[in-house]
Amino acid sequence: MCGIVGYAGPRPTVRPSDPAGGEALAVVLEGLRRLEYRGYDSAGVAVVAEADGHDGPGGGAHALHVTKRAGRLARLVEALEAEPVPDAAAAIGHTRWATHGGPTDANAHPHTSADGRLAVIHNGIIENYAALKAELLEQGVPFTSQTDTEVVAHLLGRAVAAGADLTTAMREVCRDLEGAFTLLAVHVDAPGTVVGARRNSPLVVGLGDGANYLGSDVAAFIGRTRDALELGQDQVVTITATSVEVTGFDGAPVTPRAFTVDWDAAAAEKGGYQWYMDKEIHEQPKAVADTLLGRTDASGALVLDELRMDTAVLRRTDKIIVIACGTAAYAGHVAKYAIEHWCRIPVEVELAHEFRYRDPVLTERTLVVAISQSGETMDVVMAIRHAREQGAKVLAICNTQGATIPRESDAALYTHAGPEVAVASTKAFLAQITACYLLGLYLAQLRGNMFADEVRTVLGQLHGMPDAVQTVLDRSEEVRKLAHELADSKSVLFLGRHVGFPVALEGALKLKELAYLHAEGFAAGELKHGPIALVEEGQPVFVIVPSPDSRDSLHAKVVSNAQEVRARGARTIVIAEDGDDAVLGSADLVVRVPRVPTLMAPLVTVVPLQVFAMEVASAKGLDVDQPRNLAKSVTVE
Ligand code: M6R
């Protein structure tokens, strides 16, 4: 939630009256455009520019320029075009997902100190802001917003006015703050410098040639550099054009871990699609293929060297608990069926925000698998901390290098889906299932639950999935048409069993978040215990039918469920594999997917549901990539 960008570059070579904003503003706006998925309630920038030209070694006096607007980034850009800011050696920018204070101009970031010399932007929640604000109000400090962030602006401004340099001021103030925060600040007394800090909220550093960058994630500066540094918990970073210094909140120097981003700016563009989501849906074959890449040795055995987890820990594991939220949790739910089947280890799947409140039973033999695309979901971070405090080992499955979740885990297995920009998760889901399957097979191999040839067989099936997913994409026209027909529906239901159940849940989630219509996913067997009462004439019901080759009579049971709802007036859209003619009598429409092994089915059956939700939203004229009230990365609890 909230996207943050900082830039420190060379002193401008143009005079302030020359093209507005120059490089500093260009960098920050480009970063905000790439981060807008993190929040889009308002946006703002601040630059520290020379007030009266910049001749002379130190330049002249400096002034702070702040522009901010409620609404999408486009409104900020319009405002900057109407009233340009001068070029500068330092700038910060923010795109907001509102927590404290509604999405108004006044509550938009940056916020300024009472003396107007400092600007700060913030991602997170300052939990003790009310007490701090009360103290400041008592001292006569005027407030202009309802945000928690403004207290930080006043506290920092006051510390600098009292003689501290901006970095020292940041350290001092951060020590008094509680909650989650990434902060970036600029001050007229420190032109060319941006100071950042983080606790429980993401911040990465981009290392450029003659310029340095800060961002909530690497997308902020991917157009400029792929060399980056991870910042740890409770650290302050000071960047100028030529230097990056990191210390702890206590002032002790820190050497951050460097990494190179393995995707480039082109990967973060729309590539000719109308929506990022459409592009990302079409990238799914590659997301699966890339996640499988380089995971076997010459003999065909599975190797997961990057895990760097003691194999003794994995061998002794007697329980797995998957923690995740939203789509990532459904990926975990799919994985449960596979891992239990292959490894004979009990797997629980828990929504991360519920995990620590139910007092879960954790021992040193429990392996907690934390799944997250962004690697920043605060509910997952807090659950990881709880699990580790209780002695469990945590393995992260994550799509984002340098993120908090892999950093705070004992081991990490990366999905290689590339940047996922659309708020609705698609390719990350397929990549997460793929990575979970790799983990399951690896455990089975290590613990001797499967023979080498069995592992190779399943790996071969996984390697066949990119083509199968592509086949579903090639056939998606029918679902697109259906979406336009059903766009005015009041409610859509999704039924599935076994691995089709989490797929049903995912189909419903996609439709809720994108098309704002009531949608629910059910375990098809649960229907007769209540939900069937919802069915009335014309009610659209998607039924995810397992392969006739699947376990026992599962296929027949789901086909019966489709008949039961159809008999009560439902319009059934049945997702079934090629050649499964048994579904014909219970379907108003059959959406065909290629025949794949039972446990691989979610990778194909979910695709028509993603396309359907996207097309319904599109038909309703909604913003597919940035649905209302949501943000891509949920960094508050
Ligand atoms: O970044 P994460 O994978 O941790 O995010 C988890 C959920 O917030 C995310 O999957 C969310 O449910 C998506 N908007 C669903 O499309």
Image (tube, helix red, strand yellow):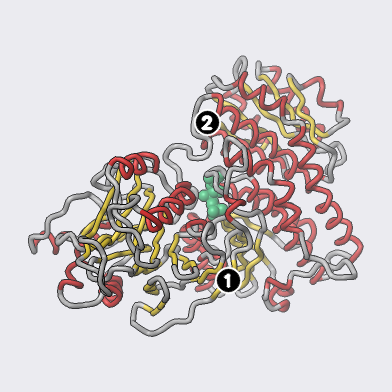
In the image, residue 319 lies at what x, y percent?
A: 67, 65
The answer, for residue 358, to whether it is visible in the render is no
Estimate the x, y position of residue 437 in percent, counting from the top left: 74, 57
Residue at 28%, 49% (x, y): give it.
Answer: 67
- Number of callouts: 2
Left or right of residue 495: residue 127: left
Taking the spot 56% from the left edge, 33% from the top edge, the residue there is 511
Q: Are marks 2 and 1 in contact (CB under 8 Å)?
A: no
Q: Which residue is mark 1?
A: 259
For residue 546, side relative to residue 493 (left or right): right
The answer to whether 293 is drawn above or below residue 169 in the figure is: above
Q: Alpha-carbon distance for marks 2 and 1?
A: 38 Å
Q: Residues within 10 Å of mark 1 (few under 14, many from 20)?
A: some
Quadrant of the rendering where the C terminus is positioned: bottom left
Instruction: Identify the image quadrant of residue 452.
Output: bottom right
Query: Residue at point 17% right, 50% down?
Result: 144
List the single residue furthest toward the bottom.
252
Element type where label 2 sits in the image: helix
Taking the spot 34% from the left edge, 53% from the top edge, the residue there is 21
Amino acid carrying label 1: it is Phe
Q: Crowding near pointer 2: few (<14 within 10 Å), some, many (20+)? A: many
Q: Is residue 304 visible?
A: yes
Foreground of the two, 550 or 88: 88
Amino acid at dot 2 = Ala
Give the vertical position of 387 relative to 331 (above or below): below
Give the image location of residue 275, x and y in percent.
57, 37
Judging by the rendered image, the residue that carries numbered circle 2 is 515
Rendered image quadrant of residue 548 = top right
